[in-house]
Amino acid sequence: MLTISGLNQYYGESHTLWDLDLEVSEGQCTVLMGRNGVGKTTLLQCVMGLLPIKSGKMDFTGTDLSGVIAEKRAPLGIGYVPQGRQIFPMLTVEENLRIGLPARREKSREVPPFIYELFPVLKEMLGRRGGDLSGGQQQQLAIGRALVLDPKLLILDEPTEGIQPNIVAEIGDIIRRLNEQHGLTVLLVEQKLPFARKVGDRFCILDRGRHVAAGAMGELNDELIKRYLTV
């Protein structure tokens, strides 16, 4: 579904991503892993058009993303939940959710009911401002907002960061449900190993801006963990 090949990206004179390759297969959950500062979030921002690339190709369902401006990537079917959630704190829950409606392919005027089935708490708090929600509720809102787009690919950047354990478990269950029952393809950045193993079908490890290992989640062995993931 998403194929990245030979991707290079720079911050000024600093070379941040080096000839990077990544394959995200349709209907699977691919977990992007690595220590802090290795380029995971940078890669996601390149996919979303938020950062320019120097060279390489990003193909999404046959479309070369390098020729697509950032504002047009969501309507292609890419839902993005950035690190830190980035909801609109002064808008209500309902207003946050409705922001995604114009990007839907069939231009629906209503939030899909299944969003509230996945996240009942959002339906209970439709009139509450986003900034008044707990961290876990804000994360659910951010995921719900991305799902409003009816995406083919859902990109999540560390969705468990700063979230209480019970909500982490719920988010894990929802990712598996979306993946297995709805056929939604997921690209997930995650540092919590138990969570990654719970939801992921495949892994890709970055180190210093380079792709260093990939495979089925069952192939993530102790040697790779010690070398690339242990702080």
Image (cartoon, rainbow, N blue to C red):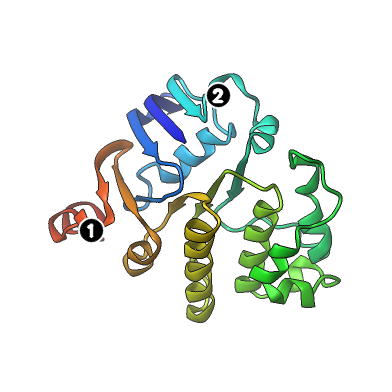
Q: Quadrant of residue 15?
A: top left
In the picture shown, does residue 133 fall above or below 84? below
Q: Residues within 10 Å of mark 1 (few under 14, many from 20)?
A: few
Q: Quadrant of residue 196?
A: bottom left
Q: Secondary structure at mark 2?
A: strand
Any part of residue 71 in sight: yes
Q: Amino acid at mark 1?
A: Gly
In the picture shown, does residue 1 fall above or below 7? below
Q: Work out how far the residue at label 2 is from the one at label 1, CA to CA, in angstroms.
A: 31 Å
Residue 51, how many percent across, how many down?
A: 55, 31
Q: Residue at x 34, y 30 (%)?
A: 20
Residue of label 2: 63
Any part of residue 159 in sight: no
In the picture shown, does residue 42 fall above or below 60? below
Q: Residues within 10 Å of mark 2 (few under 14, many from 20)?
A: few
Q: Is residue 212 left or right of residue 20?
A: left
Residue 50, how many percent across, how many down?
A: 59, 34
Q: Which mark is residue 218?
A: 1
Residue placed farthest to the front in the image? 181
Q: Is residue 2 left or right of residue 96?
A: left
Residue 4, how many percent across, how many down?
A: 41, 30
Q: Is residue 135 left or right of residue 18?
A: right
Label 2 or label 1, whichever comes before in sequence order: 2
Q: Quadrant of residue 56?
A: top left
